[in-house]
Amino acid sequence: MSSILFRQIRIIDPQSPFHEQEVDMWVKEGIVDQIAPSGTLEGKDGSQVIHVEGLHLSPGWIDTGVVLADPGLEYKESLESLAMAAASGGFTQVMCFPNTHPPLDNHQVIRGIQQRSANGAADLLFIGTITEGAAGKQLAEMYDMHRAGVVAYSDGPYAESLSTGLVIRALRYLQAFDGLLMLHPLDGQLGHSGLMNEGVQSTRLGLPGQPQAAETAIVARDVELLNYQQGRVLFHGLSTSRSLELLASLRETNDQVFTAVPGYLLCMNDSELESFDANFKLFPPLRQEETRLEMLEDLKEGKIDLLYSAHHAQSLEEKNLDFVTAEPGMIGLQTFFPMLYAHLVKQGVLSLTELIVRLSHVPRDIFRLPPVIIDQGQEAHFTLFEPDTSWTFNQKKLFSRASNSPFLGREFPAKVSGTLKNGLLMMQQD
């Protein structure tokens, strides 16, 4: 580990005594050794000095929803390329869904993938399945996976919602060790045949639509189940304001119910599909503009706890097809912060601090991970970014094995500069 001096860097961390201050900071052996007024610390022989105009530093960011391809589908994305894409996007930790081949449904598989991913550019944290093989029939050995270190339980973002009996059994099982259940509300009979949001746009384009009721019907059911059997639950992949409204009353009496929305839903609407670009074929699907605006209000009102990238690598063979047969999903780790900054911070929906809190402190609180606070004597687990420096995403800056992004060639008003984790500084090259 090396000694690093950050000069004239602005801290964004409301839990830090140095929040919104421009300071000099010494990091030695992975620990913040000294923080002093800007311009007062000098570099020493052998130390690395970082001095970039406009550079900001915050607690390391966490993405709570990444589709994992390795093991089984490494041609799409390897553990190494996923970690590199995450670090390039400013994430020091990402949470990976268990829908691999084989799925992450037992402690042996969990421990094996943990060993393979150790010491990566970003820490990969793993979500275990709720049911064996993520098949929705029998509960998996969740306690064994808890002992192996999984952070939560989910059958994945594409699985049909569990039966009422399985939801109740899972909630009761998880009470023994206070585990977190991730629910992805979807009525398969209503939702799986839809290729996009059901509405005026789907009618115009002649594509089968997914009604919002495919989500809200299951949310309404699960609200009743949680009134009957409490537990720690994260409703993940919500895409409608009605779902958030249904959960609002429950959340008034149960502070262990949380919500997560893919960031792209707050930045784009289903008009993007007029081009039939398969990179906009997403799950959950882009909704109409009215829904997007409603959800922006929900975000301001605190009804949305987490924003995540829904990063899902697909090969050219799976995406370079007509819209109907192409696989859903887009890579999103490297463009996540620039996209949210452009559409949320620049548009006055959230302040920069509010966005950073949702990327750092909120996921740590919900998943009960060790806190990260920028202060002297604390571990250096940070993200570096330049909120007022334009940046263009192109093939040369692509770290994922896949390229299924609608944003290649797009210029953004902000950029991620690097990460500092476990004493290792990774700065992006222009």
Image (cartoon, grey):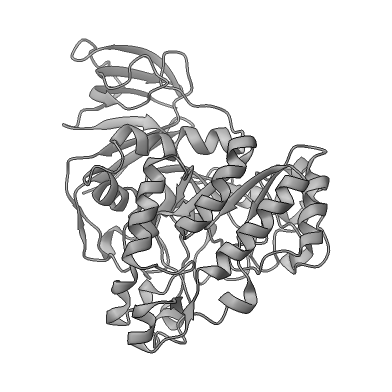
Name the side, left or right, on which 197 lies relative to 233. Answer: left
Residue 363 seen in this snapshot: yes
Hey, which residue is sitting farthest front in the picture?
249
Q: Position of residue 395 (x, y in %)?
A: 28, 65
Q: Nearer the viewer, residue 299 or 339?
A: 299
Q: Position of residue 72 (x, y in %)?
A: 62, 70
Name the side, left or right, on which 263 lies relative to 133. Answer: left
Q: Nearer the viewer, residue 175 or 90?
A: 175
Q: Where is residue 105 in the image (x, y as percent from the top left)?
A: 75, 58
> Residue at horizontal 61%, vertical 62%?
185
> Residue at horizontal 72%, vertical 64%?
162
Label count reads: 0
In this view, 295 is above or below 185: above
Location of residue 48 by image quarter: top left
Q: Where is residue 418 in the image (x, y as percent from the top left)?
A: 33, 40
Work out which quarter of the rendered image holds the N terminus and state it: top left
In this view, 20 is above or below 36: below
Name the side, left or right, on which 279 lies relative to 245. Answer: left
Location of residue 164 by image quarter: bottom right
Residue 255 seen in this snapshot: no
Name the side, left or right, on which 123 lies relative to 375. Answer: right
> Residue at horizontal 44%, vertical 87%?
324
